[in-house]
């Protein structure tokens, strides 16, 4: 029997409530799915989706991952997990790039299901990426309660035991990011209830222009100039250094970088689109991150109540909800971390209390 | 090339004003006309420029007609200039160009009405002039953008916090002597330190207020200036420049290349260099901005702004007095009016008519006006004839 190689990617919000992972204000099915799929190395192909899909469109997922994808929606609930997994393994057995994805982002306290996403990318030509030996206890042990995420972990474990698959690796959040959601959970839900009805006053971007900007805002795509070899970010259709309009090649910038400037916005000083998150979390940080020499991105700091990143800190980036507008969520990368505080960390003073 | 001169200037009280933008503009123009020593008929004005952002959207289209109505010259060609907070500086520059092209007498009016707009819309209008796609979408208004610049500046210069505190204390002390200033009250260093943070490291006293007001000046050809007054103020040089809109894309971060370029252009035609300037109006929308500007326009060398400020050199008694009128910080920053208000201050100072805040013997002055967080800038240099 041919053994298919699978690589796993796991995304879990850093927040926990009563020992169970919960989504903060700026995470949902889309952000968790993208993170798990990125970590599994999925860029293209068919994605067998188990769990609530919210409003995630094929087009959005393709823009986030960087290649054409087709979502096969297997619905929610435990039978969906098995159905999606069987679909993915059947595709892979025939040599097609395929991925299994289980997502759970419950927003009610009463729901016993933990938030998270698990993706498994399979095929004969599994894409290269970070490799780490599988720690099965990570999948099963962390996920208490009845839920789709746990079921997915259990299904893959049993599949591995049947030796139908070989695991190539596992990537997940840094475990030390865990934070207690108790002070914020109810405030997030209040904020969420009104967020997409916000009247735009300050950060309005028409939908078409927002969608045009997804390459740079979601995947940090820049232009490399073949004439002067400088990097222009975001893409402007011309080299920022020498003005060349041809010979520009799209390149993906690193998704980690060093903080070169840092502020903390006190509640009341934010554009009104950010009123819900500023109110729920008591303000937020914004940093300028150097992703490559001379190439910087202005990023909000995610998980602000537990995160202080000063100049010199090294941060990663993750796709998160930015704000809601016109009944929809707008997404972009935020800084997460710090991965380390840097050689000469200077922390900004905390914002005054609201 | 034909030079230009300022022969009249008018200023409203800055602050929370009951009047709308039309009445404020009219008041500034009336005062400018009345300030002309030998008198002038408003109907002899042959060109006008209006500087305004249109804060709150009061008259986004065709606002320039207000100027023609105010000078009683129906039919006067007036152009509205909008370059955010540098609208006034760019309008002054346009007026200088107009007299160089043959105009006889040009009126420049800057006006903004900001306090009658509710809080949420105010934050919108304070944000419209920055980069939307990265800076706004990361949750920054202008205070946040300047806070990023300040954080970098401070990280590289340990005494910069003390210098920012001194800028706030100095400009409030100067504002206390200016009857047109929004805030006419001195503040102490501990007031500055104890103020709530707006966007760390910037606190409330690092930020300029939201202010109503207008200013107007009259510009004519240098060769005609003495027709209006025995003490015209001559334009020695003018420069203007732009930079990338988003701070993240700037080569000279945290400095403003636009200010540096504008100053270089202005000094090319001036008969003296930056070290000969005896009085400067610098764009201090946030305390950090005054420090950046001191270096960018060349009043001090690179990395010398902190030491110069902490040594008191920029106080009224120092050798390079900066913002004797209180600056944007204490006088207020009605966006479109600011660049014109700076020239008003230069006009009264160089003519020895600045009252309690007079810098004795000042003959050469510089005005520096910035749009947004350094995306646009003008520098204009003046001397007494
Ligand atoms: Zn190039």
Image: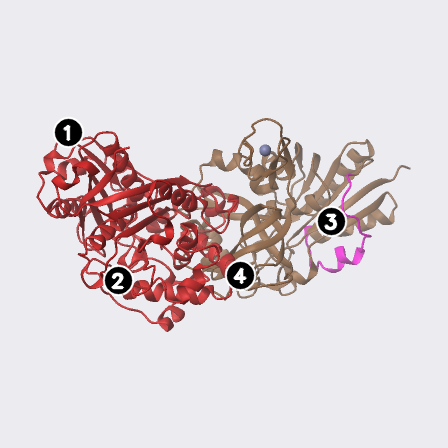
Chain colours: A brown, B red
Same-subunit check for callouts 2 and 1: yes
CB-based contact (under 8 Å), mark 1 and mark 4: no
Residue positioned 28% across, 56% down in the render: B332
CB-based contact (under 8 Å), mark 2 and mark 4: no
Q: Is residue B196 visible?
A: no
Where's residue B120, x and y in %?
A: 35, 51
Q: CA distance from mark 1 to mark 4?
A: 55 Å
Does the numbered disc 2 mark a residue whose Cβ is under 8 Å from ligand 1? no
Could you say whether the residue bearing mark 2 is in a helix, strand or loop?
A: helix
Mark linked to residue A152: 3
Chain letter behind tag 1: B
Q: Is residue A66 visible?
A: yes
Could you say whether the residue bearing mark 4 is in a helix, strand or loop?
A: helix
Mark linked to residue B155: 4
Viewer-side residue, B255 vs A264? B255
> Is residue B15 on the magenta stretch?
no
Q: Nearer the viewer, mark 1 or mark 3?
A: 1
CB-based contact (under 8 Å), mark 4 and mark 3: no
Q: CA distance from mark 4 to mark 3?
A: 48 Å
CB-based contact (under 8 Å), mark 3 and mark 2: no
Q: Quadrant of ligand 1?
A: top right
Q: Nearer the viewer, mark 3 or mark 2?
A: 2
Viewer-side residue, B165 vs A251? B165
Does the numbered disc 4 mark a residue whose Cβ is under 8 Å from ligand 1? no
Q: CA distance from mark 2 to mark 4?
A: 30 Å
Residue positioned 25% across, 29% down in the render: B101
Where's residue A282, x and y in %?
A: 47, 62
Mark linked to residue B75: 1
State which region is magenta: A127-148
Residue positioned 27% across, 63% down in the render: B174
Where's residue B382, x and y in %?
A: 28, 47
Q: CA distance from mark 3 to mark 2?
A: 68 Å
């Amino acid at each position: 029997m041919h053994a298919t190689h699978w690589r796993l990617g796991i995304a879990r919000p850093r927040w926990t409530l009563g020992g169970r992972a919960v989504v903060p204000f700026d995470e949902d099915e889309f952000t968790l799915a993208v993170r798990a799929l990125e970590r599994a190395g999925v860029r293209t192909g068919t994605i067998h989706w188990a769990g609530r899909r919210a409003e995630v469109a094929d087009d959005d997922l393709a823009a986030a991952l960087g290649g054409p994808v087709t979502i096969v929606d297997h619905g929610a609930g435990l039978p969906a997990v098995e159905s999606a997994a069987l679909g993915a393994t059947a595709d892979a057995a025939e040599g097609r790039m395929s991925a299994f994805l289980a997502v759970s982002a419950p927003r009610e306290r009463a729901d016993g299901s933990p938030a998270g996403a698990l993706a498994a990318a399979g095929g004969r030509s599994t894409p290269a990426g970070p490799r780490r030996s599988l720690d099965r206890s990570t999948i099963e042990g962390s996920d208490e309660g009845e839920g789709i995420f746990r079921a997915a972990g259990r299904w893959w474990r049993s599949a591995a035991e049947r030796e139908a698959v070989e695991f190539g690796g596992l990537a997940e959040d840094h475990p030390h990011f865990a934070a207690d959601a108790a002070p914020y959970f109810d405030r997030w839900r209040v904020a969420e209830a009104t967020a997409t009805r916000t009247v735009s006053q300050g950060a309005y971007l028409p939908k078409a222009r927002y969608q045009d900007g997804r390459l740079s805002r979601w995947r940090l795509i820049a232009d490399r100039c073949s004439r002067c070899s400088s990097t222009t970010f975001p893409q402007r259709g011309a080299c920022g250094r020498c003005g060349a309009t041809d010979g520009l090649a799209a390149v993906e910038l690193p998704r980690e970088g060093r903080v070169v400037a840092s502020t903390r916005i006190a509640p009341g000083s934010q554009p009104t689109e950010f009123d819900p998150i500023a109110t729920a979390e008591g303000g937020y940080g914004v940093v300028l991150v150097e992703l490559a020499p001379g190439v910087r991105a202005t990023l909000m700091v995610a998980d602000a109540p537990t995160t202080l990143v000063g100049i010199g800190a090294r941060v990663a980036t993750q796709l998160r909800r930015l704000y809601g507008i016109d009944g929809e969520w707008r997404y972009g990368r935020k800084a997460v971390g710090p991965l380390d505080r840097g050689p000469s960390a200077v922390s900004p003073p905390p914002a005054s209390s609201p | 090339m034909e030079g230009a001169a300022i022969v009249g200037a008018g200023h409203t009280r800055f602050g929370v004003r009951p009047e709308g933008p039309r009445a404020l503009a009219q008041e500034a123009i009336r005062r400018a006309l009345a300030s002309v020593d030998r008198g002038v008929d408003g109907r002899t004005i042959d060109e006008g420029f209006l500087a305004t952002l249109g804060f709150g959207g009061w008259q986004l289209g065709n606002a320039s007609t207000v100027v023609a109505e105010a000078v009683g010259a129906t039919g006067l060609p007036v152009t509205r200039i909008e370059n955010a907070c540098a609208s006034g500086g760019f309008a002054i520059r346009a007026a200088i160009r107009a007299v160089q092209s043959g105009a006889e007498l040009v009126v420049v009016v800057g006006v903004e009405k900001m306090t009658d707009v509710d809080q949420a819309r105010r934050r919108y209008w304070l944000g419209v002039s920055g980069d939307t796609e990265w800076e706004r979408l990361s949750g920054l208004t202008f205070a946040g953008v300047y806070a990023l610049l300040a954080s970098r500046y401070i990280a590289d210069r340990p005494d910069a916090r003390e210098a920012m505190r001194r800028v706030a204390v100095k400009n409030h002390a100067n504002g206390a002597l200016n009857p047109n200033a929004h805030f006419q009250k001195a503040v102490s260093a501990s007031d500055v330190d104890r103020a709530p943070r707006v966007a760390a490291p910037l606190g409330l006293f690092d930020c300029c207020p939201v202010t109503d007001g207008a200013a107007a000046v009259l510009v004519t050809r240098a060769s005609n200036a003495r027709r209006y007054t025995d003490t015209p103020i001559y334009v020695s040089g003018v420069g203007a420049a732009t930079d990338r809109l988003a701070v993240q894309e700037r080569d000279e971060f945290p400095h403003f290349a636009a200010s540096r370029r504008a100053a270089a252009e202005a000094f090319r035609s001036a008969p003296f260099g930056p070290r000969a300037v005896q009085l400067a109006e610098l764009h201090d929308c946030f305390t950090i901005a005054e420090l950046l500007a001191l270096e960018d326009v060349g009043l001090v060398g690179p990395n010398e702004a902190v030491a110069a400020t902490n040594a008191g050199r920029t106080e009224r008694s120092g050798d390079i007095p900066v913002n004797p009128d209180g600056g944007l910080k204490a006088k207020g920053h009605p966006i479109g009016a600011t660049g014109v208000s700076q020239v008003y201050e230069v006009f009264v100072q160089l003519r020895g008519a600045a009252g309690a805040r007079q810098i004795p013997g000042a003959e050469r002055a510089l005005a520096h006006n910035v749009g947004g967080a350094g995306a646009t800038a003008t520098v204009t240099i003046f001397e007494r004839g």
